[in-house]
Image: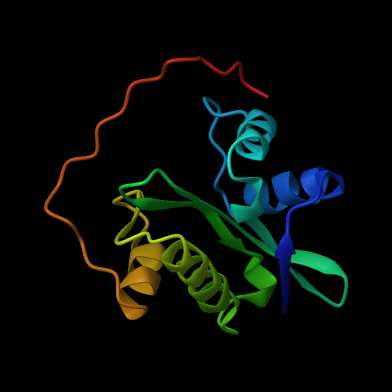
Amino acid sequence: MKIRIFSPADEAAVVALWQRCELTRPWNDPHKDIHRKLAVQPELFLVGERDGVLIATVMAGYDGHRGWVNYLAVDPDHRNAGYGRALMRHVEAELEARGCPKLNMQVRASNALVLDFYRAIGYTTDDAVSLGKRLIPDTPP
C-alpha cells in the first residue's frame, strides 16, 4: 500500500470508503469534516492506495499537548493485510517527529472489532470520560 497525503480529487472516494466502513453519522457531514481538516494540518490527512485504488484513510492532528486520530478506515475487502497498522505506524511517526508525547482517539464502546485492533497494536483504555459539545451544527448530508 502506498501512503500519501489526501488530495481534493480523493474526496468522493474517501466519503464512499467512510460510508462503506460505517464511519459516517447523520449529525456529521463528512464533506465538511474533510474541508475542516484541510484548513488545519492537512499534511496529517493521509490515504492509502493499492494498485491506484484508494483503500484506506486516517486523519491525525497534534494540538501541542496530545495527538488525535480520526477516520482510520480500511476497505472491508482489504482488511487483515496490515494496512491499518501501517497507517497507524505512519501517523505515530509523524506525530512523534513533531514532539507529540501521547496519542488519543475515540472509539464507540460498541465497536468491539476496532477496540480489539487498537489493543493489538498497543493502545489501552484510558480512565477518562469523553465529553463533547457541538459548536457548529452540521446539516445532514
Up the image or down, 93 lies above or below 34; here it is below
Q: Is residue 56 left or right of residue 66?
A: right
Quarter occupied by the C terminus: top right
Q: Residue at x 66, y 38 (%)?
A: 34
Tag count: 0
Q: Residue at x 32, y 52 (%)?
A: 110
Q: Is residue 126 left or right of residue 106?
A: left
Up the image or down, 137 lies above or below 24; here it is above
Determine the residue located farthest toward the left in the rendered image. 127
Determine the residue located farthest toward the bottom in the rendered image. 81
> In which quadrant of the rendered view does residue 2 lie?
bottom right
Quarter occupied by the N terminus: bottom right
Q: Is residue 48 left or right of residue 12?
A: left
Q: Residue at x 41, y 51 (%)?
A: 68
Camera-nearest residue between 22 and 99: 99
The percent coordinates of residue 9 (x first, y second) are: 87, 47
Camera-nearest residue between 47 and 74: 47
Up the image or down, 138 lies above or below 109; here it is above
The percent coordinates of residue 115 (x first, y second) are: 34, 64
Q: How is the image coloured?
A: rainbow
The percent coordinates of residue 88 (x first, y second) are: 49, 70
The percent coordinates of residue 102 (x first, y second) are: 30, 60
> In which quadrant of the rendered view does residue 57 lie?
bottom right
> In which quadrant of the rendered view does residue 135 lie?
top left
